[in-house]
Amino acid sequence: MKANVLVVGGGGREDAIVWKLSRSDNTENLYCIPGNGGITRRALIPENFPSTNDSIIKFAKEKSMDFVVVGPEQPLAEGLADGLRALGISVLGPGSQGARLEGSKSFAKNFMKKYNVPTAEFEIFSDSTAALDYLKTKEKVVIKADGLCAGKGVYVCSSREEATAAVREIMQEKKFSEAGNKIIIEDMLRGEEASIIVLMSPDNYSVMLPSQDHKAVFEGDSGPNTGGMGAYAPTGAVNPEILKKVEKNIIGPVSDGLRRERIDYRGVLYIGLMICDGEPQVLEFNVRFGDPETEAMLPLLKTDFIELLSGVERDEKVILDWEKQVCVDVVLASGGYPGSYESGKKIKINREDMPEGVNIFHAGTQLKNGKLYTSGGRVLNVAARGNDIVEAVRKAYKAIESISFENMYFRKDIGHKEVKRYECGK
Ligand code: AMP
Ligand code: GLY
């Protein structure tokens, strides 16, 4: 069966999903809302379209969509998947009940506690005085606003002063409005972070390639956190032994917990891990594909994406087949990001000098009169495949030499931990 598919979102993650769908013989019509300057190459983007859940649901019905793939978390938290499913449209993404695993950190932490999923010790507060009192008993903590804060609601505090300031900012100054009505104070964990992306359906799951992103803006993982400055897959940080623990101690109990809570979860579960002395602990759940992990992962996926979507919908175990390669994705950002930056810069891409095995996925780009301009903080993703991490890194940075825009900024050390692992293992 050929399928009509709508992808919701407009970042690098969605461009990678659209690219993968466009390579499937089973894709009939491919749409994206709101899309971006690169996604127009492969998907139809309705013009001047209001990206509200109601209008997306109406559009999906009118255009007889078979599948909708939802990229970002907000529409899921607001019930987009529920509305689509009520009309018989298949969705990769949980309903609003399941989306609480990302939309409410207190829900996620209580869920983990109830089902014995390893995670940092925590307390939940809805009163700032009690929270400030609790801080007197703790040294190093991480403070998290309960609700969705576009990735900005987490404070990793290295001193009591920082922790006190975080509580004040979230609860008293209301920096995130009602998303900060409750906070979680949890113990700081130390170790190496990694991302595990799982395709979940009620009785089955399939684990995708483990990956690692680079959240900090500067080299050596320093400076403020961003949406992600690059990623690579697979990562040796999650070796087969750790993966076994992730399945046994985390994915199994989560899947069981969802069933017990009567949450019919059909979609992606992203598990943010901290691997502490060989023991995987959950930092966070997301209810969607990671960005930029997806841009590093999908170029290695051989399995047809429509088959993947059908498998999750039918609650079957999706057999995932991967290239035996490594993919490194480097984000090209507007100088100044994650602080203020300028947009509207002309982008030049010289395709003739591009090495083979490189994908350029668009994030903050806009097409105007056939010319490409920057329109966001993260602008492009350069995803390069190689036979090992060193080759993939070399190709990604070689490809970047063919791309330019004013004030272009990128990290020069994406994949550095894996390169070290590779060199130690030689
Ligand atoms: P989250 O959105 O909960 O994943 O938090 C964002 C980032 O904060 C993570 O990627 C970690 O780098 C850091 N973080 C969150 N929780 C902890 C923790 N308990 N210990 C150490 N770092 C953490
Ligand atoms: N790369 C982290 C995230 O997608 O939330």
Image (cartoon, rainbow, N blue to C red):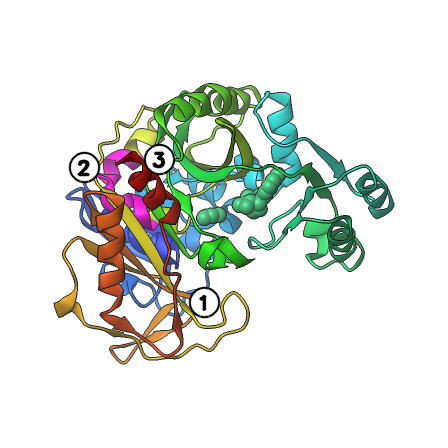
Residue tagged 3: 236
Magenta-colored stretch includes residue 101: no
Q: Which of marks 1 and 2 is nearer the N terminus?
A: 2
Residue under pointer 1: 377
For label 1, count other residues whose C-alpha is less than 10 Å away and answer few (under 14), some (14-19) or many (20+).
many
Residue 1 tag number? 2
The amino acid on which the numbered mark 3 sits, given as a three-letter code, is Gly
Tell me which numbered mark, 3 or 2, is placed earlier along the sequence.
2
Q: What element carries label 2?
A: loop
Q: Disc 3 to disc 2, how far (Cα)?
A: 38 Å
Task: Find the distance from the CA under tag 3 to the CA under tag 1.
Answer: 29 Å
The C terminus sits in image quarter: top left
Question: Label 2 crowding class (10 Å Cα cut-off): few <14, some 14-19, many 20+?
Answer: few
Q: Is mark 1 on a helix, strand or loop?
A: loop
- Residue under the image location 37 percent in, 41 percent down: 211
Q: Which of marks 1 and 2 is in front?
A: 1
Quadrant location of the N terminus in the rendered image = top left
Circles 3 and 2, Cβ within 8 Å, touching? The answer is no
> In the rendered structure, which amino acid carries the disc numbered 2?
Met
Q: Does the residue labelled 3 lie within 8 Å of ligand 2?
A: no
- Looking at the rendered structure, the kind of residue marked 1 is Gly
- For the stretch drawn in magenta, the main secondary structure is helix
| Magenta span | 295-309
Does the magenta-highlighted stretch encompass residue 299? yes
